Image (cartoon, helix red, strand yellow):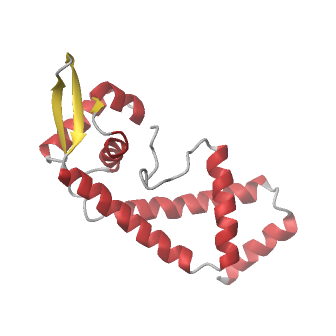
Amino acid sequence: MSEHQANRANRADTDGEDDPSAVISAVLTGSRLLVAIAARSLGAVEDRITLPQFRMLVVLTSHGETKLVTMAERLNVNPSTAMRMADRLAASRLVVREVNPRNRRETLMRLTPEGRRIVDEVTARRREEIAGIVSRMSAEQRHALISAMTAFNEAGGEPPVDDAHPLGWPDV
């Protein structure tokens, strides 16, 4: 731990852990780190897909074949935006789009094996980088992090990560 981090930790201990500004500052700093990890994990595929397109791949990984309008809802974008994202991913052969045989007005999309490979590769990179950071923490710090992040995620309504949804967003 650097001297600056130790001073901050001591300040938090003496000022009381209920100081909202100290909590907000710590969460913002952690968020910056996690965004950097996410960006680096996409490094090898960034010439092929954007972060929003990657989110679409993750939703398809979690839900399987999905209607375009449902995808737009899950990503909280309008259908035309989802359509453009799907067009780009289809052109890159990461998703397949087809007319729904039960309702010809609907478009269905699903991951291709290459799309699944990219999700798996990016997930593995994130997991490795997070594991490296966590390995530099003491057992006590890791336990505190689990408790803090679990409480934070629950307060924010984020479901726990499981093996089926390693990047989250199962109900996006």
Residue at left offset 83%, top offset 69%: 13
The one nearer the camera, 50 or 95, is: 95
The C terminus lies in quadrant: top left
Residue 130 position within the rendered picture, expressed as x and y whole percent measured from the top left? 48, 69
Residue 154 position within the rendered picture, expressed as x and y whole percent measured from the top left? 64, 46
The one nearer the camera, 4 or 64, is: 64
Above-or-below relation of 18 to 37: above
Residue at left offset 44%, top offset 56%: 163
Residue 90 position within the rendered picture, expressed as x and y whole percent measured from the top left? 16, 41
Quadrant of the image occupied by residue 144: bottom right
Above-or-below relation of 103 to 11: above
The one nearer the camera, 48 or 106, is: 106
Residue at left offset 75%, top offset 77%: 7
Does residue 98 appear left or right of residue 36 in this picture? left
Instruction: Judge whether residue 42 can be spotted in this image.
Output: no
Quadrant of the image occupied by residue 156: top right
